[in-house]
Amino acid sequence: MAVIHRTTLTPTKLELLAEWLPTRPWYRGGPAPELEKSGGFRLDDPAGEVGIEFMVTTDVRGPEPVAYLVPLTYRDAPAAGAEHALIGTAEHGVLGKRWVYDGCHDPVLFTELLALIGGRAQAVAQSITDTPDREVTRAYAGEPFPEGPFTPRPADDEHGTRLPAPHGTVLHVHRVPVPVAGTPPLPAGEPLGHVAGGWTAPDGTRLGAVLMTLAGR
């Protein structure tokens, strides 16, 4: 599993996201969000080269807190042809300069996310080395996915991000997940698969939500 380094990142992830989030069509707040890190989980890159994180960050500036799901990847060099997906660069206290990308555009993240949904990958703790995240749940009722790699073709709108997936399916990333206290209910309708997880609200309440759903086109 990936090693989590206790060190600095300059600028911080939240500083990078405060500039980037207002440019997204699914963003609900004003021009200058006030972000808090609320939770999330990680996936491992089998090659050990790309950091994969699914961060939940909460904007507390408005009248009601709004949580956003932000899949991120971290690379030690620019990804070819991915300039449009670059959130920014930051200096890591141990690893040096890192290129931070919207992970929905990254084939490594997309491939491992489908492996998670299909039951071949394990969600790991966001901030603890070698620790599975048992709060993250997944289900899949379709034909087994091939192992990939898969090239994502994401489309953003006010509802989130949609990615065409194998077997004629579409993966919907709920960028503004609908939270409930405790364990989230199963998604509405009849999706082929989903991923659910939790985070902590600004008042300390533990919340959960369906983060991604997989459905037929």
Image (cartoon, grey):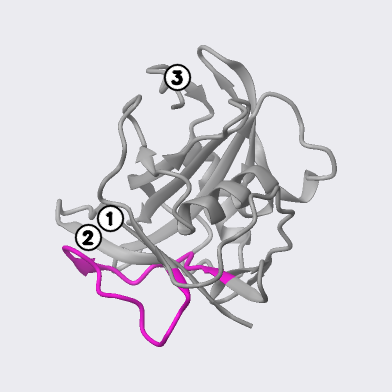
Image height of 216 relative to 6, above or below:
below
Helix, strand or loop at mark 2: strand
Depth check: 43 or 29 in front? Answer: 43
Q: What number is the disc on residue 198?
A: 1
Residue 141: % across, % down = 45, 72
Please tell me which residue is depicted at 62% across the width and 28% down the height of the picture.
47
Contact between marks 2 and 1 (CB within 8 A): the answer is: yes
Q: Earlier in the sequence, mark 1 or mark 3?
A: 3
The secondary structure making up most of the magenta span is loop
Classify mark 3: residues with Cα within 10 Å, few (<14), some (14-19) or many (20+): few
Q: Give the range drawn in magenta.
A: 171-193
Image height of 110 relative to 172, above or below:
above
Q: How many marks?
A: 3
The residue beneath circle 3 is: 8
Q: What number is the disc on residue 207?
A: 2
Q: Which of marks 3 and 2 is nearer the N terminus?
A: 3
Image-quadrant location for residue 24: bottom right
Question: Is residue 103 one of those drawn in magenta?
Answer: no
Q: Which image quadrant: the N terminus?
A: top left
Residue 82: % across, % down = 78, 45
Q: Which amino acid does label 3 sit on?
A: Thr
Image-quadrant location for residue 208: bottom left
Please tell me which residue is depicted at 56% across the width and 69% down the height of the picture.
143
Please tell me which residue is depicted at 85% across the width and 44% down the height of the picture.
81
Q: In the image as oriented, which residue stretches furthest toward the right?
A: 81
The answer for how far apart the CA atoms under marks 2 and 1 are is 5 Å
Q: In the image as oriented, which residue stretches furthest toward the front?
A: 143
Q: Earlier in the sequence, mark 2 or mark 1?
A: 1
Contact between marks 3 and 2 (CB within 8 A): the answer is: no
Residue 97: % across, % down = 64, 20
The answer for how far apart the CA atoms under marks 1 and 3 are is 25 Å
